[in-house]
Image (cartoon, helix red, strand yellow):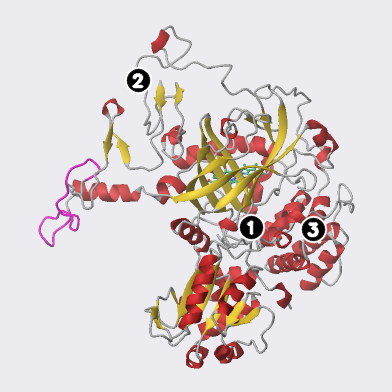
Amino acid sequence: MTQSTHEGTNNKQVPTGKGGEIHQQAGGKNPTMTTAQGAPVADDQNSLKAGARGPTLLEDQIMREKIFHFDHERIPERVVHARGYGARGYFESYDPIPELTKADLFQRKGEKTPAFVRFSTVAGNKGSFDLARDVRGFAVKLYTQEGNWDIVGNNIPVFFIQDAMKFPDLVHAVKEAPDRAFPQAQSAHDNFWDFISFMPEAMHMVMWQMSDRTIPRSFRFMEGFGVHTFRMVNTEGQSVFVKFHWKPKLGMQSVVWNEALKINGADPDFHRRDLWNAIESGDFPEWELGLQVFDEDFAEKFEFDVLDSTKLIPEEQVPIRKVGRLVLNERVDNFFAETEQVAFCTQNIVPGIDFSNDPLLQGRNFSYLDTQTKRLGGPNFTHIPVNAPKCPFAHFQQDGHMAMHNPKGRANYEPNGWGDNGGPRADARKGFTSVPVEEGGVKQRSRSETFADHYSQARQFYMSQTEVEQMHLADALIFELSKVETPAIRVRMVAHLLNVDKGLAEKVAKGLRIPDMPAPAEAAMPTRDDLPVSDALSILKNAPGTFAGRKIGVLMADGSDAAIFNALKAAAKKEKAMLAVIAPEIGGVTLSDGSVAEVQEKIDGGPSVLFDAVCLLLTAEGAEQLRAMPPARDFVADAFAHMKFIGYTKASAPLLKKAGVDQTDGGCVEMNAEADAETLIQTCRALRFWKRVP
Ligand code: HDE
């Protein structure tokens, strides 16, 4: 029998053979280096040779072991969501819901359940850049007292396809083309749009994908969704349907596309660095868990099929009930041990939670277990600390590659007659039972007719966006389709857009210079025009009204005003925002009072795209010095073009002018005195000065 309590997620302890007892890995500051077998090493610099200039000897067991291990360091990257970043934390229940579910983590107010979260992009390889226009994975592992529950979600509440059978095609289409192995980490290419143009069911997701949701400012500022309809069941056996939502405490925020392109060059690790730094500085990212709960009656009445993952239920129709919060408060000790080896499986549910018949979910329940076996090398990936439950577990599974928890005693089967030594027994009262739904039907390969409306919610999403967001969405489509080399694909996409919104289709057609408007794509059902606007679908309509968690970049040079700088630092701190100094050299700037301010970025490496707002705190000499530097001009020009709030001293005018900002506007705050620091930070609460949009 394998029975254990979990030993924690850090990997400092390694098991040895005899009896499975644990020996500490050598600790201390500078322990004697050993081989993997524990033999002390005398020389780690030179291999064993026959003479100083002679051939290296095969006998050198130490070098052979070292290189052998290095040769085997890589494991296959995830087939999708390869690039990701994880952190530890906890879920805290603050509104127990025993009436809805018997899931143990929801029973007691204030109880904390350990969690591991991994955010990811989908299409790019492990080494790709963070600001790809892409869906973000939002996968949460909750180590409950009744087993691990994985909510393997995305930052978008719907998906491209309705049936898991199409997933390999979707992924093949979006990833690099097999012949040329490019483009990397992007959907702006022929294969992707060719596939999509034949998949009307993808149009709702395409609206989300082309919106600013796919270029989040950071993981901390995005929502998460379980996507599928799940079930919850209480101790009485009563069951309801549920959809899971994660709502970021700091509100949502995205970058603009031109910014994203530049961030990828300036800091390809922008998102992972942001998460690492936030946790390191004690500014722990936080989300609330919201539930949309509904019953069979609602499911019957709802305009769309709740089993169709290309549809959502507007929050206005089924309001969200917040039941707890997720806090990320610990970085991993080792990226590979935890973030790379964490194995999320949609099949990991606990008593009180159950699946629905969503065909996408059903397919995923096979895929995740299967893929972990390949990726992590065998069936024992649950023995890896990050994947092991933190509650007691007991079963008769045994052996296999790298088995760490091995049976003790004689019993490894049941039923057995070994009494108290006979090991675990199933418990019908406590154990997982499926909701006893009656199912039946003719075996068939088909798509339910209730899945047939492909355009109505796409339209509802588009109509629910602000004017700025609609413009971004149209621009994104034009950008992506401009990268498509085959004109017929562009035309097919415009034909679909005609079923979403005529105005949108016309804008895109104009942006692509399509001379003749095609006929609308053939639709299984006409687009509904009566779905009400849902404000919850917009980012900008839900502006957080705070600059907390954001970062202001202050451009300075020798002589910059010390009093204003100190006031700005204080105002940012009060707002719980961050501040970075950018200067011509990294070694510091001497301020007006002779003090020296630390510099975080040299101007070449700290473009304004890395900050949410900027301030030009310059004297006339400083402005003159920076005016001559192209990166300083880009710093200002980009901040202005990206609708950022800009603080500036009057003396900065020559730099502003050189950067093409002839006229300041309502998004620019003049910095004459200390009090202006507070004004600037308060102004930044609006995050962008959208009125500047041309
Ligand atoms: Fe995934 N998906 N997926 N997916 N997915 C994987 O599992 C798959 C889908 C999602 O940080 C893989 O461990 C199929 C929807 C996330 O480790 C793989 C289908 C949603 C992650 C897989 C879907 C997701 C994955 C690749 C269609 C949002 C990263 C590596 C039926 C609800 C988890 C791995 C992490 C990863 C299969 C569709 C989210 C191959 C077959 C819908 C967040 O198993």
Q: Where residue 90 sits in the image (x, y, percent)?
A: 51, 43
Q: Is 320 positioned to the left or the right of 459 in the image? A: left
Q: State which quarter of the image contains the N terminus.
A: top left
Q: What segment is highlighted magenta in the picture?
A: 35-56
Alpha carbon of mark 1 to alpha carbon of mark 3: how far?
18 Å
The answer to whether residue 135 is above or below residue 621 is above
Image position of 279 (left or right of 431): left
Identify the residue position indicated by label 3 in the image: 464
Query: Which secondary structure, mark 2?
Result: loop
Q: Is residue 394 magenta?
A: no
Residue at horizontal 66 percent and vertical 71 percent from the top: 688
The three-letter code of the residue at mark 3 reads Ser
Residue furthest top as drawn: 417
Q: Nearer the viewer, mark 1 or mark 3?
A: 1
Query: As displayed, is residue 419 above or below residue 509?
Result: above
Which residue is label 1 attached to? 251
Up-down: is 402 above or below 440? below
Give 689 or 126, whichever is nearer the viewer: 689
Using the numbered discs, state the Cα–Cα distance from disc 2 to disc 3 in whole angstroms. 61 Å
Please tell me which of labels 1 and 3 falls first in the chain: 1
Q: Where does residue 329 sit, x and y in percent of width and height?
A: 47, 50
**Mark 2 sits on what residue?**
408
Locate residue 328, reporting x and y percent.
50, 49
The 10 Å Cα crowd at callout 3, few under 14, some 14 to 19, many 20 or more, is some
Give the residue drawn at x 60%, y 34%.
106
Q: Quadrant of the C terminus?
A: bottom right
Disc 2 marks a residue whose amino acid type is Lys
* Label 1 to label 2: alpha-carbon separation: 51 Å
- Name which residue lies at 75% across and 46% down: 312
Q: Nearer the viewer, residue 295 or 477?
A: 295
